Image: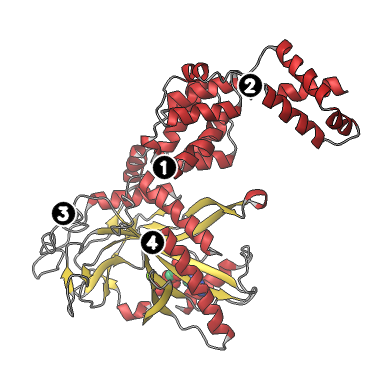
């Protein structure tokens, strides 16, 4: 144990400090359980389907009844390999299953089959952008959280408290469901960074399709290890917040925990290593038990299972089956479409969004405009109406047609937003017909525009004089007048050029 801490200590040297909270640095490491999307359990043929009648899907192997033997599910191993490849980990040629011994009502067999000394996935890194501040103060930092390991293990059953008064029900359907436990280094420095990491990890496992990512059903649950220290001091004692199953609670729980730990230290109390639960109703974390050490679990290799051997050939076969990864796709967007890295990363938040972008960009030949519209107006509307991009009322072909009309100067950005609204509300589907019907065409007749410009100059002697005296803002007032007189159909850039030309 102390050896682990020393290793972390050494690894934390020279890592950037995060934002301080009342003079304390926040240190966070994550353990995430991703339920693997296999049809059957990790060591048996029982079904993993969610929502069945209690205790109808746990077979004799899941309960470890005498005379049964576990058999490794190949699909679960393949999913672990896929994950390792997605985050640049080393895939162990030979890894070992171990028994983690403890008794709990939802684990009547008395041990969980897991991996301890040699996990199947070793090392790796999860990269993402972290936005802090808003508007002009927005800063965007690239972060890299290192993974220690990801190991295969079986889930336990579930205790049910709600339907029973003064009693607890036990549902063993979940026993033996395959999990990948993904463990990070204590590399995160704020609740915001922790949430950004968890979102990125969630994106990766759902993108490669090894986990359905359903947080309500418990398919993706995070334990946050949190400690605080004064900058430059050695790592503080951590407390582990268990089973965070929403990004919102994750942030609240960590923020509460950080405040609580700082208060304790300021009051002269030492932090005791513990496992805590977050209560969303009170917004507080509460100690569940003082934390066990590895020794308490009396790990030993499971005598029922041979070592898990993975050949180079198998790894290559799995690699060949995998779809393009978000990271690789983002690099391609930068290379092939000339997008900034931030755009490329944002557009690869989901497969559906990436596909929508590519379809739009290809159809209109304006990748940067396509990116701006998808990250801007499109995302805003998706958010407001709470719809997924797959079911957006504006298909890629329509957005591409709209962008085409901006690019060839038929309409202004303002007019384009009106057309977009019409498309979105399904009041029209043909971009050109909408432009026509709403007479949104920009004024491209220079003669007519020049006349408006001359009229506005003549009628606004005061603004003209101010501009000539060096007040740039006075020009905006004139542009505004001209835009108004043209009913918004003038091209603002053209108006600017004309005005400057006429006013010297
Ligand atoms: P265990 O397996 O006993 O829970 P580990 O040493 O493997 O403990 O660490 C578990 C998690 O806790 C890891 O994600 C690690 O990064 C994180 N962690 C370890 N030390 C600290 C600390 N001082 N503060 C915050 N997180 C920590
Ligand atoms: Mg642990």
Distance of label 3 from label 4 (alpha carbons): 23 Å
Which quarter of the figure is the N terminus placed in?
A: bottom left
Residue 104 visible? The answer is yes
Q: Is residue 49 left or right of residue 133?
A: left
- Which residue appears at 82% of the width and 35% of the height? 472
- Where on the picture, by quarter, is residue 334? top right
- Where on the picture, by quarter, is residue 495? top right
Which quarter of the figure is the C terminus placed in?
A: top right
| Residue 114: percent from left, percent from top | 29, 66
The residue labelled by disc 3 is 47
Distance of label 4 from label 1 (alpha carbons): 31 Å
The residue labelled by disc 1 is 385
Q: Is residue 246 above or below residue 288?
A: above
| Mark with earlier residue (4, 1) | 4
The residue labelled by disc 2 is 489
Q: Is the CB of the residue bearing disc 1 within 8 angstroms of ligand 1?
A: no
Distance of label 2 from label 1 (alpha carbons): 29 Å
Mark 3 or mark 2, whichever is nearer to me: 2
| Residue 260: percent from left, percent from top | 51, 78
Q: Is residue 425 above or below residue 295?
A: above
| Mark with earlier residue (1, 3) | 3
Circle 4 crowding by C-alpha within 10 Å: few under 14, some 14–19, many from 20: many
| Mark with earlier residue (2, 1) | 1
The residue labelled by disc 4 is 32
| Mark with earlier residue (3, 2) | 3
Q: Are marks 2 and 1 in contact (CB under 8 Å)?
A: no
Which element type, helix, strand or loop, lies under badge 1? helix
């Amino acid at each position: 144990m102390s050896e682990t801490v020393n290793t972390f200590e050494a690894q934390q040297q020279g890592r950037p400090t995060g934002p301080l909270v009342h003079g304390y640095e926040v240190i966070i490491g994550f353990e995430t359980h991703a339920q693997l999307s296999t049809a059957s359990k990790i060591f048996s043929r029982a079904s993993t389907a969610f929502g069945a009648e209690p205790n109808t899907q746990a077979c004799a192997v899941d309960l470890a009844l005498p005379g049964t033997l576990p058999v490794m599910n190949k699909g679960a191993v393949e999913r672990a390999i896929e994950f390792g490849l997605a985050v640049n980990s080393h895939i162990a040629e030979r890894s070992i299953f171990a028994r983690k011994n403890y008794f709990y009502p939802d684990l009547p067999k008395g041990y969980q089959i897991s991996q301890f000394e040699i996990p199947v996935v070793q090392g790796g890194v999860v990269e993402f952008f972290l936005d802090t501040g808003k508007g002009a103060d927005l800063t965007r930092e690239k972060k890299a959280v290192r993974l220690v390991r990801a190991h295969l293990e079986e889930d336990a059953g579930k205790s049910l408290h709600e339907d029973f008064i003064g009693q607890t029900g036990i549902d063993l359907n979940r026993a033996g469901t395959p999990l990948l436990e993904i463990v990070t280094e204590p590399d995160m420095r704020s609740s915001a960074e922790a949430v950004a990491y968890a979102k990125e990890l969630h994106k990766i496992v759902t993108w490669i399709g090894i986990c359905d990512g359903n947080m309500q059903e418990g398919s993706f649950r995070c334990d946050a290890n949190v400690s605080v220290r004064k900058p430059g001091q050695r790592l503080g004692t951590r407390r582990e917040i268990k089973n965070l199953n929403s990004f919102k609670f994750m942030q609240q729980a960590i923020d509460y925990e950080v405040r609580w730990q700082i208060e304790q230290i300021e009051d002269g109390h030492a932090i005791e290593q513990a496992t805590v639960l977050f209560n969303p109703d009170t917004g507080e974390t509460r100690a569940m038990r003082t934390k066990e050490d590895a020794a308490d679990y009396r790990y030993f290799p499971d005598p029922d299972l041979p070592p898990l051997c993975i050949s180079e050939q198998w790894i290559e076969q799995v690699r060949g089956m995998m779809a393009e990864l978000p990271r690789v796709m983002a690099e391609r967007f930068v290379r092939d479409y000339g997008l900034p890295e931030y755009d490329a990363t944002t557009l690869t938040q989901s497969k559906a969004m990436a596909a929508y972008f590519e379809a739009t960009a290809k159809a209109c030949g304006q990748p940067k405009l396509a990116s701006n519209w998808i990250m801007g107006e499109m995302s805003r509307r998706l958010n407001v109406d709470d719809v997924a991009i797959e079911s957006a009322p504006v298909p890629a072909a329509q957005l591409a047609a709209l962008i085409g009309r901006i690019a060839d100067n038929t309409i202004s950005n303002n007019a384009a937003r009106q057309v977009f609204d019409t498309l979105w509300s399904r009041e029209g589907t043909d971009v050109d017909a909408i432009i026509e019907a709403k007479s949104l065409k920009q004024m491209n007749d220079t003669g007519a525009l020049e006349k408006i410009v001359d009229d506005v100059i003549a009628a606004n002697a005061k603004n003209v004089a101010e501009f000539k005296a060096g007040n740039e803002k006075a020009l905006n007032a004139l542009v505004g007048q001209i835009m108004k007189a043209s009913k918004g159909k003038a091209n603002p850039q053209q108006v600017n050029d004309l005005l400057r030309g006429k006013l010297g």
